[in-house]
Image (cartoon, helix red, strand yellow):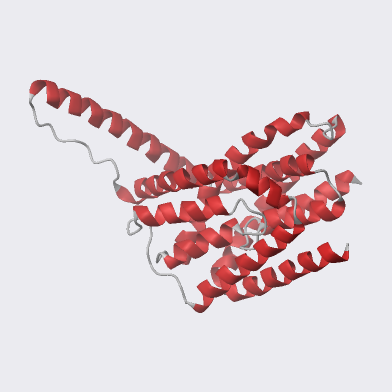
């Protein structure tokens, strides 16, 4: 039966990861009602997220390769400028420094790097609190309701603009990174919170979605390595480990199949409908907690 449960969780992860409805909240609620151990659930969640992250890397490999190359280029230019600074100080010359952030791809890569800073700080500092909250269906239900409120406010405010990477500001990237860091709490949609923040900063919906999807990759990979110690938990048998790996692969395959459709759906659909869904799921989780 555990294999069937993991298949169900993998499908839920693949579908909800690319919608503003909190995949982590859905997984946590299902694990609670299926009676899974907390330490086992944390590892499975991180592995399922790793599976959909692999789907993102596969489908957007060309864009990600370009961003990675531009990030390396910025690093090399920064090292070159440092050498020039040392040279100028020693010789008294005034050689010009290379401009590090040039073009939309370099600006995009730099924005992603800036957004990682608050995400990492909040993720590390609030990890224990998030684990405690994840064990509570009440917190999960409240998280869904909070997500619904944020989505509804953003929709009714007609937020969004025409900003792309060239027009985006560094402070907006910091705010979006903070929002991603806060989404470690179950029920609060990472995609929903970061996209709403980007829209409120004047980003176009297309760029906001792409930014949110790409900035999730370092966070997901980092979260996996923080939970990898649970492989040694008593509840993680050899069969459970292989089943979890199978679920991760299934989440990756399912993610490859649905990601394009889900992204287009989020681009075209008004957020009020996702808000209504989040309200409904939040109420159901809270009622089920008291019923069971």
Q: Residue furthest right?
A: 1
Nearer to us in this view, 179 or 108:
179
| One can see residue 290 in this view | yes
Relative to residue 245, is residue 288 depicted above or below? below
Relative to residue 165, is residue 250 depicted above or below? above
Q: Residue furthest left?
A: 92
The residue lying at 64 percent from left, 38 percent from top is 224
Q: Image check: 164 left or right of 99?
A: right
Where is residue 190? Give x, y as percent.
58, 56
- The quadrant of the image that shows the C terminus is bottom right
Snapshot quadrant of residue 159:
bottom left
The image shows a total of numbered marks equal to 0
Where is residue 287? Give x, y as percent.
81, 68
Snapshot quadrant of residue 207:
bottom left
Where is residue 101? Give x, y as percent.
30, 44
| One can see residue 249 in this view | no
Q: Image check: 141 left or right of 259?
A: right
Snapshot quadrant of residue 82:
top left
Q: Residue furthest bottom?
A: 156
The residue lying at 68 percent from left, 42 percent from top is 46
Q: Image check: 216 left or right of 133?
A: left
Where is residue 74? Give x, y as percent.
33, 37
Nearer to us in this view, 92 or 120:
120
The residue lying at 48 percent from left, 52 percent from top is 178
Relative to residue 24, is residue 263 depicted above or below? below
């Amino acid at each position: 039966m555990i294999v069937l449960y993991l298949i169900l969780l993998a499908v839920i992860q693949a579908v909800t990861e690319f919608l503003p409805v909190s995949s982590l909240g859905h997984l946590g609620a299902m694990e609670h009602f299926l009676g899974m151990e907390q330490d086992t659930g944390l590892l499975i969640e991180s592995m399922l997220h790793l599976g959909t992250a692999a789907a993102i890397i596969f489908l957007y490999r060309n864009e990600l390769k370009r961003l990675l190359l531009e990030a390396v280029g910025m690093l090399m230019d920064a090292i070159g400028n440092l050498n020039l600074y040392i040279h100028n100080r020693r010789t008294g010359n005034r050689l010009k420094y290379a401009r590090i952030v040039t073009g939309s791809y370099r600006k995009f890569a730099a924005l992603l790097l800036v957004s990682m800073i608050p995400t990492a700080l909040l993720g590390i500092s609030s990890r224990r609190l998030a684990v405690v909250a994840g064990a509570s269906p009440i917190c999960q239900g409240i998280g869904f309701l909070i997500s619904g409120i944020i989505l509804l406010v953003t929709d009714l405010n007609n937020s969004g603009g025409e900003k792309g990477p060239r027009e985006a500001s560094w402070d907006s990237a910091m705010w979006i990174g903070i929002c991603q860091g806060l989404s470690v709490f179950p029920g609060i949609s990472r995609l929903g919170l970061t996209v709403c923040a980007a829209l409120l900063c004047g980003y176009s919906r297309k760029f906001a979605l792409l930014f949110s999807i790409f900035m999730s990759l370092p966070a997901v990979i980092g979260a996996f390595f923080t939970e990898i110690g649970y492989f040694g938990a008593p509840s993680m048998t050899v069969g459970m480990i292989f089943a979890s790996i199978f679920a991760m692969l299934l989440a990756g395959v399912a993610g490859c199949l649905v990601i394009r459709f889900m992204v287009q759906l989020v681009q075209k659909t008004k957020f009020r409908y996702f808000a209504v869904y989040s309200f409904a799921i939040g109420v159901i989780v809270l009622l089920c907690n008291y019923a069971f």
